[in-house]
Amino acid sequence: MTDRRPAAPTPPPTPPTDSEVVAARWDGEDLSGRSFQRIAFVDVDLTDVVARGATFEECSFRDCELNGGKFTDTGFLNCTFTKSTFFGARFEGCKLVGSRFERCRFGPVEIVGGNWQFVGLGGADLRQATIRRATFREADLSGARLSGATVHHVDLGGAWLHQTDLSGADLRGSDLSSLDPAAAALGKAVIDLDQAVVLARALGLKVEEAVPMES
């Protein structure tokens, strides 16, 4: 059995910001193509914003509402989200490398494609999430709740999944090579045959072809 990491590394400190936006109403705004760097967004209403090809770099979001936001090909690079909400938000082809989420509420968030490498989602409640064809390599999902979530064809290689609740989740097509089935909740999860082999081997079982019946 491969060596499993029991806990994710300590997250890096939040990058310092140079300016801030406080208590602003940007609901329904079109932020497409705009670039934001090292800005602290505090108590900002971003409900139903549209952002195609926008970039947020080393920004922080605290007590912000991103509900219903439509983010396409947008980058949130090394950003920090704290006590923010994402109900009904959709991220398509977005890049969130190195970003982390603390005490956020997600609800039925949808993630399609994109790069979420090294993202910090430890302890996040993602039970209503739909995640498809995205890269979550080396992501911290330790202690996250994904029971009942849809996680299709997601690259979870190297991800931290210690004490992650995947019970009842539809995991078909996803890379489960980093999952220790003895250290996560998997009851009634839906997996495909290839994943079944991976998990059996992770439990130390040998998977071989069936012995032919003797005549």
Image (cartoon, rainbow, N blue to C red):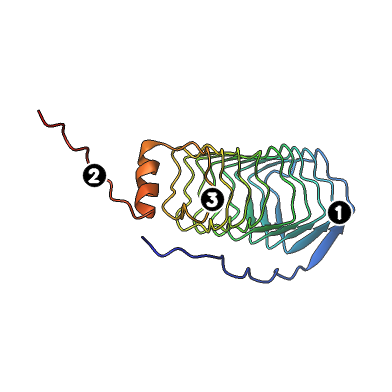
Alpha carbon separation for disc pair 3 and 1: 27 Å
Q: Amino acid at mark 2?
A: Glu
Q: Picture coordinates of residue 100 (x, y %)?
A: 66, 59
Return the residue nearer the eye: 24 or 207: 207
Q: Earlier in the sequence, mark 1 or mark 2?
A: 1
Judged left or right of residue 59, residue 145 is left
Q: Which residue is mark 3?
A: 115
* In the image, farthest residue toward the top: 215
Residue 208 shows which numbered tag? Answer: 2
Q: Which residue is mark 1?
A: 43
Q: Earlier in the sequence, mark 3 or mark 2?
A: 3
Alpha carbon separation for disc pair 1 and 2: 57 Å
Say which quadrant the N terminus sits in.
bottom left
| Vertical comparison of 79 with 153: above or below | below
Q: Amino acid at mark 1?
A: Asp
Q: Nearer the viewer, mark 3 or mark 2?
A: 2
Mark 1–mark 2 CB contact (< 8 Å): no
What's the residue at 82%, 54% (across, down)? 63
* In the image, farthest residue toward the front: 215
Return the residue nearer the eye: 183 or 15: 183
Is disc 3 placed on a helix, strand or loop? loop
Q: Picture coordinates of residue 17 (x, y %)?
A: 76, 68
What's the residue at 22%, 37% (across, down)? 210
User: Badge 2: how crowded within 10 Å, few (<14), some, or many (20+)?
Assistant: few
User: Badge 3: how crowded within 10 Å, few (<14), some, or many (20+)?
Assistant: many
Q: Picture coordinates of residue 126 (x, y %)?
A: 65, 45
